[in-house]
Image (cartoon, grey):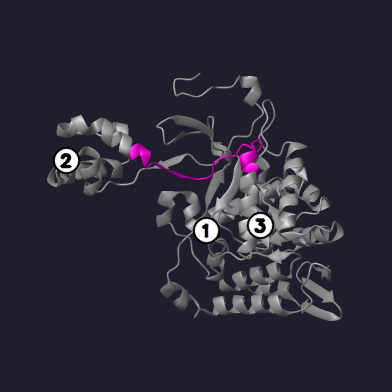
Amino acid sequence: MTGEGYIMPEEDLIENMFFRKPGLPILFVRFPDGREVPYWNTFYQEVRYDKLDAIDLVYALDIQYPTAQKLTDRINAEISSGKKPKEIDFGEFSRYKDKVVDLLESRRKYLGQMDLNVRSPKVWEFYEETLGKLSRYGAKIVRLDAFAYVSKKPGLRNFFNEPETWELLEKIKEIADKYGLVLLPEIHSKYEEKIHEKLAEKGYLTYDFFLPGLIIDALERHTGEYLVKWFRELQEKEIRVVNMLGCHDGIPLLDLKGLLPDRYIDKLIDTLVKRGGYIKDLHGRKNMYYQVNCTYYSALGENDKKMLLARAIQIFMPGKPQVWYLDLFAGKNDYEAIKRGHKEINRTNLTWEQIYEGMKKKIVRQQLSLLRFRNTFPAFDFDSKITVDNTDEQILIINWVKDGNIANLVPIWRLTISV
């Protein structure tokens, strides 16, 4: 038992575990009865405290309003400075400290995702309830965020343990099937580990986390060599993907390991950093790249032609396109937001006014035109026949054919040379 109030496992039971940050991912959660219970919390451990209102203290402490206002001002100033309730200097109001601290802690809020105990029947009742609710709301595809971290076992990794991960996935699929839902397990892993192939072999959709980096590499080096290689692999191995350019996280890099040579990954990182991106290292370890946080538009040098070409390649690649709203509006890196964390660089909230103004931009209208074409032309379907030709590495021709309908993109690669 540690002094912090949780049990530290023997080293040999956790030495193989994959931690996303230093130390054990322990988050203390306050229960209604005041107990502090340690929870395993793989991703986030941020705790927030709401500011108090003077009326709160009038009732909680049975004091007059003027006194409550003075005390509230002092408390809120301390909370705003980043202090925890127990660290607040109450000064002349020290007699109220215990009750105020208890009030603040009882209203504690947590940011992030808590791990669930999949051995608990209550968790499976929750899964059933949640998937049923999503189906009634009209959902068709359900993304299983960071699914590979679900299975944990002493002595093993806490990432993609086999066969436990597959068994859990099949159990969730049984529930999803009842509600007509398609599952999309979100798993970041190196290409060379072939986890994406295993998912496809078992009939699941998988995220194409390789495409964002491959497109930028192709545009910067003026060759479709590795992009075409990946295209053909998707076809030959019948891998069904949801593809993407940017997303709420960043541009994946670790995923490219084994698909794109290391020297080209390094060059890609240098390019993205020069264009304002921030490298996110793997669980706090330096020189172990994971992703670069930036908008896709900024990653392309804020070049409208490259953005349009990247979108065209995406919608003609095999798979179902996923569109991040900032990409659609040619969003630029938000450096002010980085103060809240690297990922915030690509999570800027757009106001209605910004959206209306954005709709006037040519690059926005062009992307929308491409997406309408993709959504309405009958050739685009998982069951279509798709071919690619890249004879001289400067011309990329992609054909989709279904029931005699052909969607032919010719020649998008020549646009690369003219950018």
What amino acid is at disc 2?
Answer: Ile
Q: Quadrant of residue 203?
A: bottom right
Q: Earlier in the sequence, mark 3 or mark 2?
A: 2
- 3D distance between C-alphas at marks 1 and 3: 33 Å
Which one is in front in this view, the residue at disc 1 or the one at disc 2?
2
> Label 3: which residue?
142
The label shown at residue 275 is 1
- Considering only order in the chain, which callout, 2 or 1, is on the residue closer to the N terminus? 2
Q: Whole-percent x and y of residue 373?
A: 69, 79
Q: Check whether the beta carbons of the residues at disc 1 and disc 2 lie within 8 A of each other.
A: no
Instruction: Reply above or below: 229 against 67.
Output: below
For mark 2, what is the residue?
63
Q: Label 3 vs label 2: CA separation?
A: 51 Å
Q: Where does the C terminus fall, quadrant-wise?
A: bottom right
Would residue 272 be visible to someone looking at this image? yes
Figure check: 294 above or below 26 = below
Vertical placement of 251 versus 106: above or below? Answer: below
